[in-house]
Amino acid sequence: MYSARDRVANEEWLARIEQAADRLDLGSEARSFATDMFLSEVPDEDRSKRAIAAASLYAGALIAGEERSQSRVADAMDVSRLSVQQNWKPVLEAAGFRPPSW
C-alpha cells in the first residue's frame, strides 16, 4: 500500500501516466488501476520509474478491459516495448492478480 506522501513525491510520474492514458483514450478505471499499481511498486531509481509506469498503465488497461498493445503503451510512455513486456507481469502479480497465460 502507499501513502499520500508517495502520491506527492511521484506527482510527475502520475502526470505522465495521465498524459499517456489520454493519448491511448483510456477510461478512468484503467487510469485508477495504473496509478494504484505504480504507487504500490515505485522503484527507488528514477530511470526505472518510466518502465514501471508504462507497465502499470498496460496492466491497468488489461484489468479494466481496455487492452492496448504493448507497443502503443510503450510509445505513449516513451519507453521500449521490451520495458513493458518485461515488467507488466511482475507489476500485475504484486497487485494480487494472476497474469493471463497467453
Image (tube, helix red, strand yellow):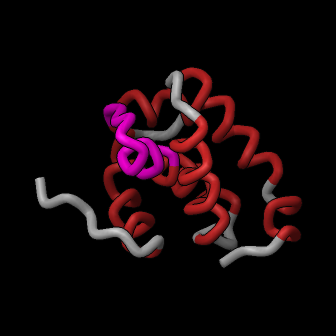
From the top left corner, tell me how far across and down residue 72 is, in percent: 40, 28
Whether residue 65 appears in magenta in the rendering, the answer is yes
Q: Which residues are magenta?
A: 57-69
From the top left corner, tell me how far across and down residue 101 is, in percent: 13, 60
Residue ID at (38%, 35%): 66
Residue ID at (50%, 53%): 56
Q: Could you say which is closer to the camera, residue 64 or residue 12?
A: 64
Q: Could you say which is closer to the camera, residue 20 or residue 84?
A: 20
Eyeballing the image, is 24 above or below 91? above
From the top left corner, tell me how far across and down residue 31 is, in percent: 59, 43
Residue ID at (52%, 30%): 26
Residue 40: image quadrant is bottom right
Eyeballing the image, is 92 above or below 26? below
Eyeballing the image, is 65 above or below 23? below
**In this picture, residue 39 sits left or right of residue 55:** right
Tally the numbered discs.
0
Q: Quadrant of the N terminus?
A: bottom right
Eyeballing the image, is 94 above or below 33? below
Whether residue 8 appears in magenta in the rendering, the answer is no
**In this picture, residue 7 sits left or right of residue 55:** right
Residue ID at (36%, 32%): 68
From the top left corner, tell me how far across and down residue 93 is, in percent: 37, 72
